[in-house]
Amino acid sequence: MTTRNQQAIAPSTAVESLRTALAAAGIALPSLAVDTASPHLGLVELGRVRPDVAAQLAAALRVGGRA
């Protein structure tokens, strides 16, 4: 089910926002991009990361909480 809030943000805007926030935490997701395989869904591709990057991301989420 898609809500209005899910569609309010363009995938490209979400990618740039996430990339900026991750960079501020010292984290890079090399494959972060708009998912071009399903343009009608407006998805963001997070891609694969090394285990240490996944651990950094988890730590940043624990410290940062919810926005």
Image (spheres, rainbow, N blue to C red):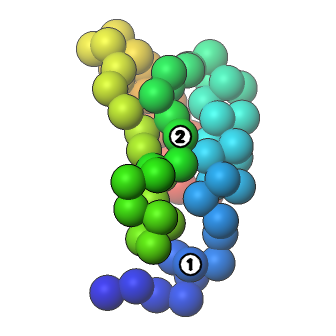
Q: Quadrant of the C terminus?
A: bottom right
* Left or right, residue 67 beside residue 60: right
* Left or right, residue 51 beside residue 5: left
- Seen from the viewer's position, the closer of residues 47 and 56 is 47
| Residue type, label 2 | Ala
Residue at point 65%, 69% (across, down): 9
The residue mark sitting in front, 2 or 1, is 2
Q: How many marks?
A: 2
Query: Does residue 16 lie above or below 47 as drawn?
Result: below
- The x, y position of residue 10, in whole percent, is 65, 65
Please tell me whether mark 1 sits on a helix, a strand or a loop: helix
Tell me the tag on residue 36: none
- The x, y position of residue 4, in whole percent, is 55, 89
Residue at point 46%, 87% (across, down): 3
* Left or right, residue 5 beside residue 54: right
Residue found farthest to the left: 51
Query: Does residue 67 lie above or below 22 as drawn?
Result: below
| Residue type, label 1 | Gln
- Seen from the viewer's position, the closer of residues 54 and 19 is 19
Q: Are marks 2 and 1 in contact (CB under 8 Å)?
A: no
- Seen from the viewer's position, the closer of residues 36 and 65 is 36
Q: Is residue 21 visible?
A: no
Query: Does residue 15 lie above or below 5 as drawn?
Result: above
Tell me the tag on residue 33: 2
Please tell me whether mark 2 sits on a helix, a strand or a loop: strand
Rendering quarter of residue 62: top left
Residue at point 72%, 35% (across, down): 20
Residue at point 59%, 59% (across, down): 11
Query: Does residue 16 lie above or below 14 as drawn?
Result: above
Q: Quadrant of the N terminus?
A: bottom left
Tell me the tag on residue 7: 1
